[in-house]
Each structure stands twice: as structure tokens, then as C-alpha cells.
Image (cartoon, grey):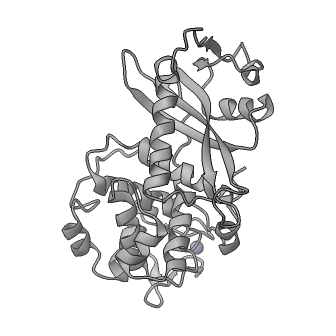
Amino acid sequence: METIPLVAGRDYPHTYRGFVKMFPDNEACATYLRKIRWPQGFVCPSCGIISTPWKTTRDRLACPSCRYRTTVTAGTIFDKTRTPLTTWFEAAWHVSTAKNGMSAKTLERTIGTRYRVAWTMLQRFRVAMVDAERKQLAGRVEVDETYIGGVKRGGKRGRGATKSIVVIAVEVKDPKGFGRVRLRHISDVSGASLIPFVNDVVASGSTIQTDGWGGYNCLDPTKYTRSITVQSSSGDPAHVSMPGVHRIASLLKRWILGTHQGCVVPEHLQSYLEEFTFRFNRRSSNSRGLLFRRLIERAVATSPVTESDVTFGYGWG
Ligand SMILES: [Zn+2]
């Protein structure tokens, strides 16, 4: 989409030192958001005219044509936030540059906010990450389900513990290696849950590799070629017949157990899957600072998320 390539040190910080220098105060953060949100100049949300806005107060902008007043954060995930932009930026930096991301607990300690503030920022960033994944997977795509287990319900381990089902789709490259992934938390493994997922995330013309499970029988044959992996009676292990999904499932489980100590409740599982996907699909990016920039870009392009959205589980529909 961008015509001019982004430059480290100018368009995004390269190191934490550079980050601190680039964003000394809220004003610097707001200016950065303005550049990302309105690269061709301020576009009035009311009349649509491009102009240089008047600054009425520190962060209020007014349209010279229609006098409509707004802020750079209005209509984004930063909308009406009481948390300073510097704190949001600090959180975005740590979340995008830590190799495995961060739990709310670690973020709370790292930037010194209250737990609730850290948790809410993380949830909002995860919502911003989902829209980044619009382009459908293509080529040869492995699809299979996995179980995220031992998820605690009611705070008790063991008794009443419930497993959540996650369906995984991953591009498999020739001769080896994997492309992008997409993940969805589903309530059961019926065709009614599996087929819409495949239709949403895999492009027409792709080859879908599955096991013999009947839930995939209703894949549209005019849209996809289905290739069924039949496990041999000698017991071909899953990692041989479906290396992609096997690899993703084990990375996902390790991430949930490691970074998040396994503390992921079913209501919020999808938002964790979005963060895993965002991170995995950009794993080859050689600059962590670029990931920070992408996250901020997503954050200004994403509509406000309410407190109740993040508290009771975002309606991912
Ligand atoms: Zn206007």
C-alpha cells in the first residue's frame, strides 16, 4: 500500500533508545499519530475537506472550513482514553518488540501502571491486530483442529477444567517451510463450525489438506481441491502427515503456557489467537520497530473498543 518505503529512525524507532528519543512526551506521540492517520494532511471527519487544522487547545484540532472540532485519537482505539499516549506507546513498544509478547502482569511491572490499565491496553491492541489479517491464505493450506487444554474455569484447576477447540489453517510452502496462519476458537468440530472458517480465511482455488474427518466433507468442490491425509495403519504421527498444523499447535500451546502461564479463559481465547497470528505472520520482519509501527497503524485504523467489549469478550463474529 505504501509507495515510499519506511525508514528506520525516521518512520519508526529502531531500538529502545531511539524509541525514548522519538517519543519524549504526549505531543510527540500525537504528532506521530497524525502523520500515520492523515499522511496527505488532516482530513476533516465532518466535511471531508483536507486542510491544515487549527489547534484550539493542546490536543484539539478544528477544521478551518466547517469548524468541526476533533482530536487525532477520536474514532481510534485510543478514543476517550484517560491513559496518556506515552503509556500507550510504551505498551505498544514492549508488546511488539518482546519476542513472545507480554502478559498483562509483565506489562504492568514493566511500565509501572495498574494491572487493569495494562490489561485493557493489551486487549485493545489485540482487537486492532485482527483487522490486519484480511488477505486470505492461498496455495496449499493445511487445516486441522487442536485442543487448548486445562483452561481453568472458576479458578479451580482440574475439576471442571474445560478444553477449548481451535481450528488452525496454515499455508505450506514447497519444498518446505510455512507461510501465514489463521486461527479460530470454535465451539465444536462440526461442519457448521469448520466450513465457514475455511470459506472466510482461505482463497478460492486453494488446495485444502485435511485428515479424513467428515466435518470437512461439505467443502465446496468448485472452490477448493481437497486433499485428504490418510493416516497409515502403522500410525503415521501427525507431525509427519500434517507438519504445518502440528508445528503451529505446539507453538501456540507453548506461547499460552509460557508467556501467559496458561491463564487464558475461553471468553478471551480469540483475542490471544489474534495476537499469536499477528506476531507469527510477521515473524520474518527483521526489525521489531517496524512491528511497532504496524501496530500503531492498526490502532489508528481501528474503531473504538468499549470497556465492556474487552471485559466480557470482544464480539469477534
Ligand atoms: Zn470540516
Identity of the residue drawn at 46% across and 18% down: 240
Q: Nearer the viewer, residue 65 or 152?
A: 152
Is 205 situated left or right of 241 in this image?
A: right
Task: Please identify the quadrant where the N terminus is shown.
Answer: top left
Identity of the residue drawn at 51% across and 74% down: 73
Is 50 situated left or right of 26 in this image?
A: right
Place of residue 3 in the rendered image (x, y in percent of width and height, measured from the top left): 35, 44
Identity of the residue drawn at 55% across and 9% down: 234
Q: Is residue 60 above or below residue 201?
A: below
Place of residue 23 in the rendered image (x, y in percent of width and height, measured from the top left): 29, 75
Place of residue 297 in the rendered image (x, y in percent of width and height, measured from the top left): 44, 58
Instruction: Check the image and name the residue furthest to the top.
Output: 233
Where residue 296 sits, quadrant-wise, is: bottom left
Instruction: Check the image and name the residue furthest to the front.
Output: 159
Place of residue 200 in the rendered image (x, y in percent of width and height, measured from the top left): 66, 35
Count of marks overlaid on the render: 0
Is 245 situated left or right of 269 in this image?
A: left
Is 209 situated left or right of 98 in this image?
A: right
Residue 216 in view: yes
Identity of the residue drawn at 45% across and 47% down: 254
Q: Nearer the viewer, residue 197 or 229?
A: 229
Q: Quadrant of ligand 1?
A: bottom right
Residue 63 in view: no
Q: Is residue 171 above or below residue 86?
A: above
Q: Nearer the viewer, residue 72 or 53?
A: 72
